[in-house]
Image (cartoon, rainbow, N blue to C red):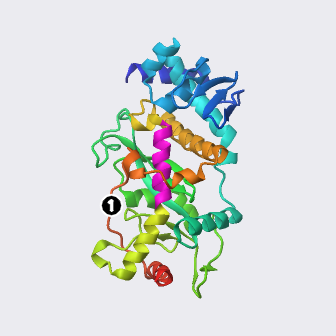
Amino acid sequence: MSSHEEDDHEHENEHGDDVEEQEIHVDVDSDSRMSCGSGSDVDMDGGSCYDESETPLRYLATGMSIRGLSFSFRTAESTIRQMIPEVCQAIWDTFCRTHMAPPSSEDFLKVSKDFFEKSGFPNCIGAIDGKHVRIKCPTNSGSEYFNYKKFFSYVLQGVSDANCKFLFIEVGFKGSQSDGGIFAASKFNKAVRNNILNIPDAKQLPFADITAPYVFVGDEAYPLMTYLMRPFPRRSLNARNETFNTRLSSARRCIECAFGILTEKWRLLKREIDLLPHRSILAIKTMCLLHNTIIDIEKINDYIYSFDANEQSTTPSLSRSNNRSGNEAKQIREQFVEYFN
């Protein structure tokens, strides 16, 4: 066990894993500055920080090493390692219900309206994708976290609305897991299958005599389901199917942009996260929540579709796979094909 892991365990034994309610309040304004507790500011683009309570935010925003932060703020590494999960937990507890609450039926209808206006894809209530986030190999984990890109990672699975805001996130899948296995095992998939989410009933598509269910959209890494549309494989493309693929790709772009913006704003995601596993997961979740918070407050909806996710994002996507689809799911996809043609 490394020295920093010993420090982490030492603090966990002393303080416990659960962070109690504390007076840490985080505010974000239009200048992308954040304040915690004492009201001191940290510039999210890397400006100065005036109080060591902001050190964890600097860690998330810049990706500076723990050792570098220790030198910069004259604070022990063990103290910084303890502060990071405490501040992350406080941020999560403060903002989760406001900026990442489960969508209501009315919320889903608004999401669908936005997708149709921005991409022309009707009855779409979210775009899904997954990204590998680089981590330090957990102790005694062997190759469980070693992915096809040849580094250790967690998989972050996200579902975004048309404005690149995360509707659902799930973190902690091992990098070696297959994309199909990750989706099948995800709480999101189980919630949809068990009708736990507030998804509206099927509705007639705009300006057409076609009734179709509300669906999520994903790329080739995902299976075709009654509630999840994926593109036609290239081997079976004709003009009609290609039109469908083009529309689906346009709807999917928002999740690619979401991951790209997330990575550019929170640069810890551009380097290896050197924390214990449960603390890494909390840090990733917190960055996603702060991403939503900034979108809500800064109202950057007009910016997102000009963001080139392919050029900016450095968190690798999931691998592609072949998927067999049920007849009902294929029939639903054909309804959308008919609509687009």
Q: Which residue is farthest bottom?
A: 209
On the picture, is 82 further left or further right than 310?
Answer: right
Residue at image location 47% in from the left, 50% down from the top: 307
User: Which residue is at the front of the view, 302 or 237?
Assistant: 302
| Residue 66 falls within the magenta-colored stretch | no
Residue 264 colored in magenta in the image: yes
Q: Is residue 24 left or right of residue 316?
A: right
Residue at 29% x, 46% y: name it.
149
Q: Measured along the vertical axis of the image, is residue 159 above or below residue 124?
A: above
Q: Confirm whether residue 194 shows in the render.
A: no
Give the residue furthest to the top: 74
Would residue 311 be seen by someone viewing this image from the given angle? yes
- Name the foreground residue: 302 vs 330: 302
Position of residue 70 relative to residue 150, above or below, is: above
Which quarter of the image is occupied by the N terminus? top left
Left/right of residue 134 with respect to residue 78 in the rendered view: left
In percent of width and height, residue 216 lies at 52, 66
Marker count (numbered): 1
Q: Residues within 10 Å of mark 1 (few under 14, many from 20)?
A: few
Q: Which residue is depicted at the point 52% across and 31% down?
A: 45
Q: From what the image shows, is residue 53 above or below residue 113? A: above
In the rendered image, residue 225, in percent from the top left (x then y), is placed at 47, 72
Principal secondary structure, stretch drawn in magenta: helix
**Quarter residue 94 falls in:** top right
Q: Which residues are magenta?
A: 253-266
Q: Where does label 1 land, which residue?
A: 320
Residue type, numbered disc 1 = Arg
Q: Is residue 313 above or below residue 7?
A: below
Q: Secondary structure at mark 1?
A: loop
Q: Position of residue 82 (x, y in %)?
A: 55, 23
